[in-house]
Image (cartoon, coloured by chain):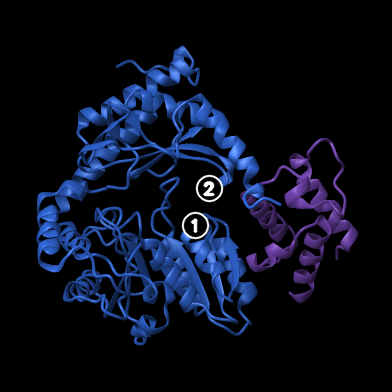
Amino acid sequence: MGLFDRFQTLIDAHARVTHEGADPFGVKMDRLVSSTEAIVNGRHTILAGTNNYLGLTFDDACIAAATEATQQLGTGTTGSRIANGSYGTHKHLEQALADFYGKKHGMVFTTGYQANLGVISTLAGPGDYLVIDADSHASIYDACRMTQATIIRFRHNDPADLDKRMARLAHEPGNKIIVVEGIYSMLGDQAPLKEFVAIKKKYDAYIVVDEAHSLGVLGENGRGLVESDGVEDDVDFVVGTFSKSLGAIGGFCVSNHDDFDVLRLVCRPYMFTASLPPSIVASVTKALEITRSRPDLRQRLWDNVDTLYDGLAAQGFTLGQQKGPVVAIYMPGTEAAIRFWQLLLEAGVYVNLALPPATPLGTALLRCSVCAAHSKEQLEKIVEVFTNLAYEFGLFEEPKRAVA
Amino acid sequence: MSNLTDIIADIAQHLEPFRKDGAPITADTNIGRDLNVDSLAIMDLLMALEDKYNVSIPLNLVPDIQTVQDLARTVSQMKEAA
């Protein structure tokens, strides 16, 4: 059998898609004009599908910090955190994160994916249980596969289902570790964290919350769902990423657990990889300071969310139920979603395309994300382009058009 | 208390929407190969069976579940262990 034969169905499907128009998985940003605009195929394109929630990728202070760090500390560490790759700035960032969350310990990973891989796969050993939300990110599923723990999946955002499954484990020895996210990446809905925390207490379990899409977005101080739901003292481990609100790449974990630092000696995705370059550590440290000190950015983000979400809803699009910076637009099927995505790009709007099996319930979605740096005009333009295409495409019939 | 045959019939019914080429679903049907079902649909099927039989099927067991009979046996084993 050929090496890639088992992928033939996927290869054929991909070929059909790219025959029609642009490849959704092969978009090239030729030039970045700003955090909200790029040149794609020679065309000015509004970026409505990034994870740049606070628009900090073009922040002057973050860029200056990155530039200075490169000049002073070089382009890279060329080493692992347990060898030569721990600079003062790495430790400082860990301390800043711990301080931000009011926790004793912080640990920085080279990517958010590795943070999940590392923390989840190391916390759960043989005889333990990982109880994960069904809509968990690929990094969480992959982390589970790396363990010898038993993996139980519960219905997305369903405390009654979690409770039922935890009850089945109640008499089993071994640690039970519940894993949920703050804001889910496809539909943008939030976990009912207060209820989940109540369940973890009831069964004397642990809970890990992945705040990838919620850091900088939720909570008065931007500390995510743990803050806005008032459960900061009850969550055992918060993991997150530097690749969304903080505008770069990297991951972290914070915790009050007394033995937390043991992870540095046993966590393979931390040990056996090169550490982040000084420029990234510097820009992220600066971005974290900005997140803490600029609630106006968060306010601007949520004002923009209103403009986009309410604008699309008013035109008749079926959206993800919970309003937030991740705005999912339901499409009638995979082929329609792909074709609509291609037409949007040709009209100068880039969004994400989400297809089964990566989406909940086998749905096909177009996924927008809102940025604090989006202008009202850009957001209104996105709604206008979506709406015009919906009529041309036959998604809407004439009577639904809202009067401007 | 369901016996294996009942569980197999139940699973076959759940898998009806995924039939390929009108071939009937039997105990020996290979779920991944003989049906139009992706990884998400398989996991959703597992959840429906977990609800119905009031068991938790660990994801760790999924790689060993090839046929309808394998799945039925797993459900039955989980049920007995409960």
Furthest-front residue in this view: A2
The subunit carrying tag 1 is: A
Q: Horizontal placement of A386 versus A301: left or right?
A: right
Query: x%, y% of residue A252?
Result: 32, 68
Rendering quarter of residue A238:
bottom left
Query: x%, y% of residue A41?
Result: 33, 28
Rendering quarter of residue A287:
bottom left
Furthest-top residue in this view: A398
The residue sitting at 19% across, 34% down in the picture is: A375
In the depicted view, which residue is nearer to us: A89 or B58?
Answer: A89
Q: Amino acid at mark 2?
A: Ala
Give the answer, above or below, for where A271 lies relative to A43. below
Q: Amino acid at mark 1?
A: Ala
The residue sitting at 18% across, 59% down in the picture is: A283
Which residue corresponds to mark 2?
A: A358
Task: Report the disc number at residue A338.
Answer: none
Give the answer, above or below, for where A385 lies relative to B43. above
In the depicted view, which residue is nearer to us: A56 or A325?
Answer: A56
Q: Colour of chain B?
A: purple
The residue sitting at 29% across, 41% down in the picture is: A370
The chain whose colour is blue is A
Q: Are marks 2 and 1 in contact (CB under 8 Å)?
A: yes
Residues behind callouts 2 and 1 on a single chain: yes
